[in-house]
Amino acid sequence: MSLVFESDIIDALKARDDSSVDLVLLDPPYYEVVSDEWDNQWASLSDYLAWSSGWLQESVRVLKPGGSLMVFGYFPVLSRYMVFLPNLDYQDYIVWTFNRGGKGTQLHRRHEDILWMSKGSPKFHHLRGERYYRTRVYADEFAKYSPPYPEGLIHKANAHRGGTAGYDFHVEGAKLSNAWHIERILHQSKERVEHPTQKPIELIDRMVRMTTDREDVVLDGFGGSGTTALVCSRLRREYYVSDKDPAYVQMAQSRIDTDEYGLLSMFAL
Ligand SMILES: C[S@@+](CC[C@H](N)C(=O)[O-])C[C@H]1O[C@@H](n2cnc3c(N)ncnc32)[C@H](O)[C@@H]1O
């Protein structure tokens, strides 16, 4: 039975049995990146990391063998998280890029990252034929040197060695890369609700489909506006999505209740 509920992250995880979740998808507070109170609860980075280590340990406990843990963040934080996860297997470091974003200190911030760990060999779907990233960012710049890869096509293996330049169709579509270009939620985005760090449906949808099957169990204990719950409801995954802020829990529930695409879930893969 799926649930959207109010809870502290630790309690949400403690409520689940050992080895009972296929995907733990967590989008934690970043640590002093946004001005909201929830991102500024710690006296120092080491306090924040100590707190994080608690929910990371619990996440490992609830993961099924073959289950995935996917955590959002930035390199300085995610690289430290890896140290707390010696018993999980590293799968990838996905870079989610966007053209509009935060100011940053020296450089504009144009990516967020996702650390992907698993308990043993993970359940994994290639999602071949998904939007092929390669030249989406600065496509015009790249096109000066080489034509962009059209979606779903792969470069002919021998093109650079004097063979015929061009593109072939992969029989099942091109393989997905670990750099995903998906625009952030902007003020004018159709799916936007009132949450400062709402994640795009397309992004969460890709993470869920890549690592789970229909009826699998997904847990998101930093649920925010409820993007994970909405995606899981559309894809017919069982979900446990919580947030400590009751206003966000309400927001998440109402996104599901009023979802105009809800009926499509009967076709979910
Ligand atoms: C980065 S946001 C998640 C955004 C979400 N992925 C979305 O698409 O809307 C982090 C969320 O964690 C929640 N949060 C902060 N501390 C928490 C805690 N100790 N337990 C549970 N949730 C917490 C905040 O209220 C905030 O909504």
Image (cartoon, rainbow, N blue to C red):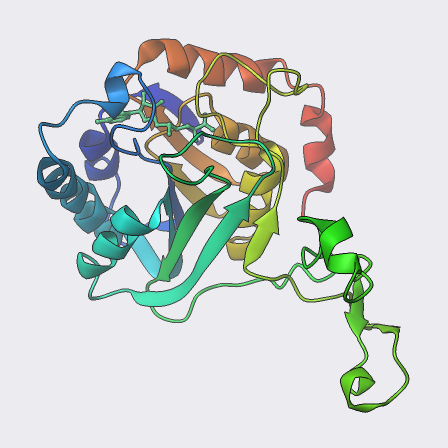
Residue 167 quadrant:
bottom right
- For image coordinates 17% across by 56% down, the residue present is 84
Displayed-image quarter of ligand 1: top left
- For image coordinates 27% across by 56% down, the residue present is 79
In this picture, is 53 found above or below 109? below
The front one of 151 and 125 is 151
Q: Is 243 displayed left or right of 188 in the figure?
A: left
- Check the picture and name the quadrant holding the N terminus: top left
Residue 89, position as x, y percentages in the image: 32, 68
Q: How many marks?
A: 0
Q: Can residue 214 be spotted in the picture?
A: no
Residue 53, position as x, y percentages in the image: 15, 46
Residue 85 quadrant:
bottom left
Q: Is 136 displayed left or right of 235 in the figure?
A: right
The front one of 178 and 66 is 178
In this picture, is 57 found above or below 124? above
The front one of 251 and 148 is 148
Residue 243, position as x, y percentages in the image: 32, 23
- For image coordinates 82% across by 83% down, the residue present is 159
Residue 169 quadrant:
bottom right
